Amino acid sequence: MLISVLLIILGFILLIKGADFLVDGASSLARKFNIPDIIIGLTIVSIGTSMPELFVSSTSTINGSSDMAIGNIIGSNLCNLLMILGISTIIKPVKFQKETRLIEIPICLIITIIFAIFCNTSGEISRIEAIVLIFLFVLFIIYTIIMAKKGNSFDGNTVIEIQTDDKPLSLKKSIILIVLGIVGLKVGGDFTVENATNLARMFSISEKIIGLTILAIGTSLPELVTSVTAAIKGNSDIAIGNIIGSNIFNILLIIGVSAIISPLTYNITYNIQIGILILATIILSIFPIIPPKNEMSRFNGLIYLAIYIIYMIIIFVR
């Protein structure tokens, strides 16, 4: 058991560092070819923070563990919204940008509802539905770039600061970092999924619970670090935008890619978690309307965190 736990921790470390290496290498390579920094931030960097979820869910799918793949995404989105945003807001109240409250939060809600419909129509996420999700992901990327070019910083994707004053790494170093990043993500994903599965079998815990808890929280560590750091620095637009952007990416990109690899069988008991996720997103859309307007207060953050704690207790007590 101890070896499995240590390998899971090692897996998370490899996932996080692998994502960092991939982002650093790809960003440097992009700058070397004179790709604008804003485009790098909205694509390479934002996708990079979702790499742990992508590799864990993809690995789970390849291993035939649909429960773990879907549980990882639903659990990560709940963790992002309720725990990470809750903690960030408790540290410092979060201000809502106009685009976030009027466009991105509604988009996140609509995409979550579409995901719920796909899950419950045929008992699985088919390849055709996966293609629809990937198409929506491409549209979302195009939207973020258009908004950025209009001079409105898109909250949901500028999640990591890129040091544009630094000289790009050499082509050789950039490629080495990209390769190391991909290897780290692949090995980390394998370690995490295989040993989480072993733990589940050892303690007779369902793959669903493992996906919703251990994997979800572990793969959300990049978002936790980014949002909490942003909140401490007073960059509240990044703190909340990081969460909304990540939740959209998780459903569109990661579920989409995983289901293209192999259709994902859906466990109908996940409807409870999806219902909580939809409700939490609706509550988030209400926060800017109620006092203090256009702001998520510390009290709101406490509400979110309390909901997450109660939700986690219920998962293990049931």
Image (cartoon, rainbow, N blue to C red):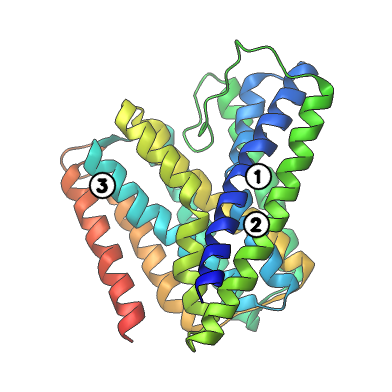
Quarter of the figure that contains the C terminus: bottom left
Q: Position of residue 282 (x, y in %)?
A: 34, 57
205 sits left or right of 122 in the view: left
Q: Position of residue 9 (x, y in %)?
A: 52, 59
Mark 2 sits on what residue? 188
Discs 3/1, front: 1
Q: Position of residue 225 (x, y in %)?
A: 43, 41
SS for dot 3:
loop
Mark 1 sits on what residue? 18
Discs 2/3, front: 2
Q: Residues within 10 Å of mark 1 (few under 14, many from 20)?
A: many
74 sits left or right of 281 in the view: right
Query: Taking 33 as reference, is 70 above or below it?
Result: below
Q: Residue 50: tell me if it is visible.
A: no
User: As shown in the figure, which amino acid type bears the numbered disc 1?
Assistant: Gly
Which disc number belongs to residue 287?
3
Q: CA distance from mark 2 to mark 3?
A: 37 Å
Question: Foreground: 115 or 48?
Answer: 48
Q: How many discs appear?
A: 3
